[in-house]
Amino acid sequence: MTQHRIIDSPLGNILLRAEAGALTGVFFAGQKYYPAQDGAGFSESGTEGRVLTQATEQLRAYFDGTLRRFTVPFRFAGSPFQQRIWQALCDIGFGETATYGQLALGMGLPSSHSRAVGGAVGRNPLSVIVPCHRIVGASGALTGYAGGVDRKRTLLTLEGVL
């Protein structure tokens, strides 16, 4: 059963989604690709309720500056290519950044695939937890972020990058 919770954060409301014992969505209010409500309820029980609570506690600790690595169980739902990109994002540590080209090369793809990589990064359904905000343009510019460049700047500032 899919369950949702909306939490407040320093960057606005965040919609959390859990199903089958794993976190499957973390979306900022107004973010690009924000999911349409699928009729799933906001009632919280069982494993999904525990996952939502764990995600809430960890996100609050992250925003408070006391958490650097998330351990809440999560699961990706996307194409095999997207899932491969999203998994690679998990290897970029707190306070680090990489470019789209570096991400492509690190996965054995030519840097010319950086646009396709960027498309997959932009559709990451687990904002903050899977750190797509740590990907920057080749010049280091804070290019595109589904949650908005201002949020990206704030997240990177929180992590001491900016």
Image (spheres, rainbow, N blue to C red):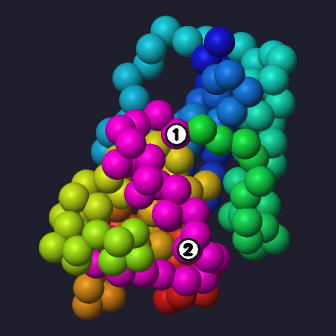
Q: Callout 1: few (<14), some (14-19), or many (20+) C-alpha neighbours within 10 Å?
A: some
Q: Is residue 70 visible?
A: yes
Cα distance between the residues tagged 2 and 1: 17 Å
Identity of the residue drawn at 22% across and 58% down: 116
Q: Earlier in the sequence, mark 2 or mark 1?
A: 1
Residue 122 included in the magenta stretch of the image = no
Q: Callout 2: few (<14), some (14-19), or many (20+) C-alpha neighbours within 10 Å?
A: some
Residue 94 included in the magenta stretch of the image = yes
Q: Position of residue 155 (x, y in %)?
A: 54, 70
Q: Secondary structure at mark 2?
A: loop
Q: Give amino acid for label 2.
A: Ile
Image height of 53 relative to 147, above or below: above
Image height of 41 relative to 77, above or below: above
Q: Position of residue 68 (x, y in %)?
A: 73, 71
Residue bearing the label numbered 2: 92
Residue bearing the label numbered 1: 76
